[in-house]
Image: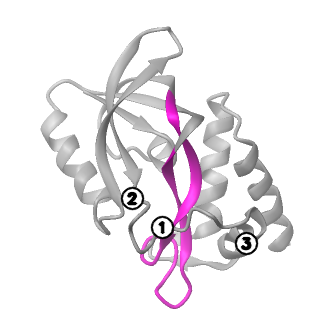
Amino acid sequence: MWVFGYGSLIWNSGFEVAHSEIATLSGFSRSFCMWSVHYRGTFETPGLVLGLDRKADAECRGVALKVAAGHEDATLAYLRERELTASAYEEQQVPLRLSSGTEVNAITYVVDPAHELYCGNLHLEKQAEVISTAVGNRGPNADYLLNTVEHLGEAGISDSDLCWLATRVKELNA
């Protein structure tokens, strides 16, 4: 069983991983396209979290996480509890191209653009303003962004929008 991590699953998987490898998913982009009213914000001051947003000409580089043998059922239950709490994500099996050239099918969570928490058209400056101030029960929204950018960088994955956001959020919080 493979899981595609494009955000916090990269640095906080929460399950037993036997192997990980850089992977590319076609037809989707990673973006701060979902309001967060629990984990990284509140109902009064929502934060933003990452989602996979469908875009025909896009590609998202992330990490394919191979679940340790014997942990498949527990991992799936854990991921569903973690990712499907607000019903804003849809669980999908997607084809990934691993950096080794192998193709695998993986479980991932794709944002539902019809959901009330979807906000896929926010300008980057607005995203930075939100992320710089929001705090939820898992901590500051800025920490989520900065951890994701740091771990993407460690994996050799560059995301120009997230790097710009990290720089701008640091400026706003200086």
Q: Are marks 3 and 2 in contact (CB under 8 Å)?
A: no
Q: Residues within 10 Å of mark 2 (few under 14, many from 20)?
A: some
Is 37 drawn above or below residue 120 in the view shown? below
C-alpha separation, residue under disc 3 versus residue under disc 2:
21 Å
Residue kind at label 2, given as amino acid type: Asp
C-alpha separation, residue under disc 2 versus residue under disc 1:
7 Å
The residue tagged 2 is 112
Left or right of residue 123, residue 86 in this image: left
Residue kind at label 3, given as amino acid type: Lys
Label 2: state its secondary structure. loop
Residue 64 appears in which quarter of the rendering?
top left
- Pick the residue in front: 37 or 52: 52
The residue tagged 1 is 118
Magenta stretch: give its range: 25-54
Counting residues from the start of the chain, the first of labels 1 and 3 encountered is: 1
In the image, residue 150 lies in the stretch drawn in magenta: no
